[in-house]
């Protein structure tokens, strides 16, 4: 039992007091009274009760409920940063509290931190029901409706065991002749890289269901111990239609790649992208694309046709599971450079204690070429196995930048030994959305 000073308004619902008095009641009963006061808009009185309770024995209280009420009071006063701080601490200890995730999302929405808000809503919504579920749906719709322009910047240091994705075997059989490769970039080299990426996206509203859609992206990776950097840039533009649970985009695309400051390839094409909410827990997507690519080496020029499928499902309030499958066909001028590519990947993302988000993503890709290149005398087939482990603290920021850490392993086995390689890469990065 706790001894708590309750002003007359605190017991107005019971009519027990006409003047402020000091009474002894249970902690649960005091929280009931505080909750009633919050519902009536009497925030100062409710705050006083919570303050008195917090000064007592925490073991005698439902601290999650106390913190939830404190966050509700802060949000009602417009102190959304404080509400996010309180709820973040609670969710750090118990990520399964769906209702508190919804409250967290509401405050983040008021702070215009829409990416974080949407993250919490996607995790919470499958566990919500009734009015809470409807609130989550409306909040996601509001986030989508006001997302007109966004800018995202990311930078990372990249310690890498194989910066040039080359074989480590110096002796190779090429065209039936045993040869020794020189260490001029043909053999694997370790090094430290720096990558930067800037992405801008615009979704101007045309009608209630139709929007314009445009995205521009530029990425630069500069590796030490090798003579060239790698630059990619491109974009897409078109229309997006949203109706109920279905979203469809029809886009024109353009992309280019440069190595060491010199042009390598450029392509133009089109893409159709469909995304649908299959139920409260599951979202699926498909896309189809075609690109006409012009390489520096004319033998590689040709059309590429690709298709992809993805499925993401919330498993509880702290876990997202995903599966992806993709395929592509490249028709090059030279049949020895034409290929089929198929692959797939799994992903699991879980928010654990401390507000840390962990992700594991294994993948597999198989590529087979139409004919043998005359130089090698053998048709090329590659099997690429990869896996990524990543960690991020979504609600922790350094001057607005969120830190991220990941490790990626890649192993490529090829019928042509020149293309066998193994790679270990660590990414120490910072990212920020504007």
Image (cartoon, rainbow, N blue to C red):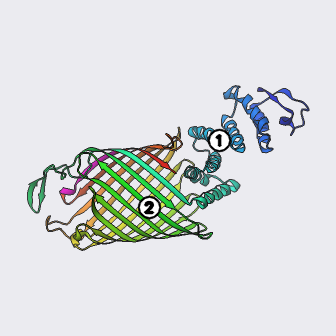
Residue positioned most to the right:
18
Position of residue 353 relative to residue 187, above or below, is above
On the image, which quarter does residue 90 sit in?
top right
On the image, which quarter does residue 49 sit in?
top right
Q: Secondary structure at mark 2?
A: strand
For this view, does 222 lie left or right of residue 320?
left
Instruction: Please rate how many residues cluster around mark 1, counting C-alpha atoms within 10 Å: few if below 14, some from 14 to 19, many from 20.
Output: many
On the image, which quarter does residue 125 sit in?
bottom right
> What is the number of the mark on residue 157?
none
Q: Residue 234's x, y, as percent? A: 39, 63
Q: Which residue is mark 1?
A: 83
Q: Secondary structure at mark 1?
A: helix
Instruction: Please rate how many residues cluster around mark 2, counting C-alpha atoms within 10 Å: few if below 14, some from 14 to 19, many from 20.
Output: some
For this view, does 283 lie left or right of residue 325?
right
x 63%, y 38%: residue: 86
Residue positioned most to the front:
261
Q: Which residue is mark 2?
A: 216
Q: Is residue 423 magenta?
A: yes
- Range of residues picked out in magenta: 417-425
x 86%, y 27%: residue: 21
Q: Residue 24's x, y, as percent? A: 81, 26
Position of residue 25 relative to residue 342, above or below, is above
Nearer to us in this view, 30 or 297: 297
> Tag count in the figure?
2
x 89%, y 34%: residue: 16
Q: Residue 409's x, y, as percent? A: 32, 48
Q: Residue 231's x, y, as percent? A: 33, 56
For this view, does 246 lie left or right of residue 335?
right
Looking at the image, is mark 2 or mark 1 earlier in the sequence? 1
Quadrant occupied by the N terminus: top right
For this view, does 176 lie left or right of residue 195?
left
Position of residue 277 relative to residue 31, above or below, is below
């Amino acid at each position: 039992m706790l001894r708590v000073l309750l002003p007359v308004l605190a017991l107005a619902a019971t009519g027990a007091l006409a003047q402020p008095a000091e009474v002894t009641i249970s902690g649960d009963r005091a929280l009931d009274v505080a909750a009633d006061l919050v519902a009536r808009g009497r925030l100062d009185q409710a705050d006083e009760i919570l303050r008195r309770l917090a000064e007592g024995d925490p073991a005698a209280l439902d601290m999650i409920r106390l913190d939830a009420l404190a966050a509700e009071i802060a949000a009602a006063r417009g102190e959304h940063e404080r509400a996010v701080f309180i709820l973040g601490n609670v969710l750090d200890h118990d990520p399964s509290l769906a209702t508190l995730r919804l409250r967290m999302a509401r405050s983040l929405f008021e702070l215009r931190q829409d990416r974080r808000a949407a993250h919490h809503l996607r995790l919470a919504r499958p566990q919500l029901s009734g009015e809470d579920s409807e609130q989550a749906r409306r909040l996601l719709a509001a986030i989508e409706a006001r997302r007109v322009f966004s800018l995202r910047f990311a930078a990372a240091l990249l310690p890498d065991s194989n910066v040039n994705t080359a074989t480590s075997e110096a002796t190779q059989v090429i065209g039936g002749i045993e040869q020794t490769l020189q260490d001029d970039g043909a053999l694997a080299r370790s090094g430290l890289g720096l990558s930067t990426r800037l992405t801008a996206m615009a979704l101007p509203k045309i009608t209630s269901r139709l929007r314009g859609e445009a995205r521009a992206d530029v990425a630069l990776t500069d590796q030490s111990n090798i003579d060239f950097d790698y630059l990619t840039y491109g974009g897409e533009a078109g229309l997006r239609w949203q109706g109920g649970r279905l979203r469809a985009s029809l886009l024109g695309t353009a992309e280019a790649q440069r190595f060491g400051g010199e042009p390598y390839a450029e392509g133009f094409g089109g893409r159709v992208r469909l995304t649908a909410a299959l139920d409260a827990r599951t979202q699926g997507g498909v896309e189809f694309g075609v690109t006409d690519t012009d390489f520096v080496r004319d033998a590689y020029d040709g059309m590429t046709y690709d298709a992809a499928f993805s499925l993401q499902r919330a498993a509880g309030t702290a876990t997202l599971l995903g599966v992806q499958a993709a395929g592509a066909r490249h028709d090059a001028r030279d049949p020895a450079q034409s290929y089929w590519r198929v692959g797939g990947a799994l992903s699991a993302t879980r928010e654990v204690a401390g507000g840390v988000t962990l992700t594991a993503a294994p993948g597999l890709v198989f590529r087979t070429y139409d004919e043998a290149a005359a130089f090698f005398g053998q048709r090329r087939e590659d099997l690429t196995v990869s896996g990524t482990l990543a960690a991020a603290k979504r609600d922790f920021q350094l001057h607005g930048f969120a830190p991220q850490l990941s490790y990626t392993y890649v192993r490529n086995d090829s019928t042509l030994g020149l293309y066998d390689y193994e790679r270990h890469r660590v990414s120490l990065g910072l990212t920020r959305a504007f």
